[in-house]
Image: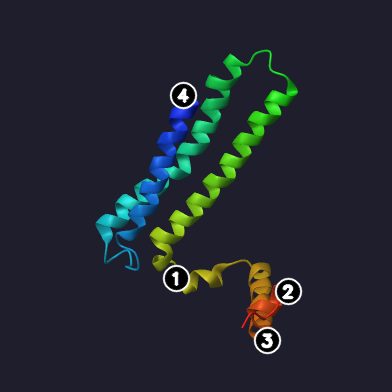
Amino acid sequence: MEPARIAAWVSGAFAVLSLAFSCFGFGKSFDQARSIRIVQAIVLSVWIIGPPVWFWAEYFFIWLPSHRQATSQMLDEFKYGQDVAGKSWLGLVSALQGLYFGKDISPVAATTLPWFLLSTRRAVDSRVLRQGVHESFGLPHLL
């Protein structure tokens, strides 16, 4: 089996296990489940650092040496595959961060946002409160 296919299966299994691991310590603050949170921070760090390193290594050490006479279409297909994988990776890292540490994010942190984000957030919040969630996104009321 080729290295890229092996990496895909291993990373897929690791992604499922990482998401399942969010069940441990879910809804508890960092102080209540400290040992679990440390392991979750390590898992999240591996997911943050690992895939970009893999994308780099895959291009320079796997794809490029085996495709010296590649056409631009072949390169575009490879880049498209890495683009899709990168977006999936970003979604997974975001989900893991929320599942692992969502309880630890303080409401005070929202006040440290730049002023333009705060004003946008207030405008969206007030629109949602005035019109309801469905109308604010242009959706018909379902109830």
Between the residue at mark 3 and the residue at mark 1, the CA separation in whole angstroms equals: 26 Å
Q: Which mark is residue 106?
A: 1
Q: Which mark is residue 3?
A: 4
- Report the amino acid beneath label 2: Gly
Give the position of the N terminus as an image quadrant: top left
Front of the two marks 2 and 3: 2
Q: Residue at x 55, y 29 (%)?
A: 56
Residue 29, image x, y percentages: 33, 67
Between the residue at mark 4 and the residue at mark 1, the CA separation in whole angstroms equals: 42 Å
- Report the amino acid beneath label 4: Pro
Q: Residue at x 55, y 68 (%)?
A: 112
Q: Which mark is residue 53?
A: none
Give the position of the C terminus as an image quadrant: bottom right
Q: Residue furthest front?
A: 143
**Residue to which mark 2 is pinned:** 138
- Report the amino acid beneath label 3: Arg
